[in-house]
Amino acid sequence: MTMASSISTDIVQEHNRFEFWRDLVCDKIIHLDIERVFPDKPFFGSIKTGLLGNLQLAAVHSIAQKARRSGHQIAEANEDKALFCFQLTGKAFLLHDGRAEEVLPGDWAYCDTTRPFQWSFPDRHIQLALKLSRHSLLKYAALPAVMPVRAFSGKQGLGGVVFDMVTSIWNQADHIHNHQIEVLERIVAELLATVLHEQLAAPAKGARSRMVRLVEAKAKIRQQLDDPNLSVASIAHQLKVSVRYLHFLFNTEGTTVGRYIRERRLEKCKHDLGNPLLKDRSITEILYSRGFNDSSHFSKLFKKRYGLSPRQCRFMS
């Protein structure tokens, strides 16, 4: 993960700090109108940025203020991004569509940058912002063109999984290697897209039930990827559904169960081939440990997926 040093208002003279902060937020996060809550008090703010593939992260530490995304900023910026804000410390209020939602430490929110909203921070706070293109989300779920701004509880359920995963990635940033980024980026984007589709796209009850089943099926598959006996029938049996219904679930995403298993196994193998700790393991050992049982077939699949052979992948890592 690519990290950058923190930028703080401490590097400029005190009377210039707030203006510097407004420019910094617009440059590192999105275009916002920032308003001081206590103009007579000394101002402080810092931002530490990081890049996980195409995911842009920034930890924002500051004092009481209001940050508004208005129609003017939307028109001026001309960007279609999804912004996710994870409240690490301090309380915040998210104002949108005529309502206000309290966001406490452990909670998070989705902000569509093409819609107006306002953050109100009554005191010192730290918020982790994650920004990515809407196109990245659409690869994993069918989302409406316009979605409402929304706060989520990160204390339980899928919302808790999202909060824990994103904040853990940020906290472990110094220990994430380049060959791990692609897998993590995909997992984060797919998980965020799943939550948005389930909570904001408001599918019918039957569709929501199918979505939950699909998430469960994917989780079962990931847990058993290394098992060469993993099959459509075994997953269907564990979920207590028919093989036909399991195929139907994956068809709703334009894929098949077999293709999903194959893609996840290829990702694992690519990760292992780039892992310096596994340099003494042969390519054959790696592919067999990840559930493949034919080295020739594996090589063809790998080259078709990544455009280079397993040996070339290892050499380039």
Image: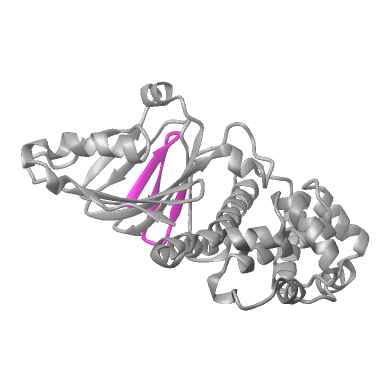
Percent coordinates x, y for residue 126 in the rendering: 30, 55
Residue 147 position within the rendered picture, expressed as x and y whole percent measured from the top left = 56, 37
Q: Nearer the viewer, residue 44 or 123?
A: 44
Give the residues in magenta. Answer: 92-109
Vertical order, 66 against 250 (above or below): above
Side (left or right) of 258 relative to 163 = right
Placement of the N terminus among the 4 image quadrants: bottom left
The residue lying at 42 percent from left, 34 percent from top is 98
User: Residue placed at 36% from the left, 40% from the top?
Assistant: 29
The count of marks equals 0
- Give me the residue at 56% from left, 59% from top: 184
Q: Is residue 275 above or below residue 138?
A: below
Instruction: Identify which residue, 193 or 9, lies in the foreground.
Output: 9
Q: Position of residue 173 (x, y in %)?
A: 41, 62
**Do we see residue 190 in this rendering?**
yes
Establish if 275 lies above or below 258: below
Characterize the magenta stretch by its predominant secondary structure. Answer: strand
Q: Residue at x 42, y 31 (%)?
A: 116
Direction from residue 69 to residue 219 in the image, left or right: right
Give 202 or 124, whichever is nearer the viewer.
124
Q: Observer-nearest residue: 110 or 60?
A: 60
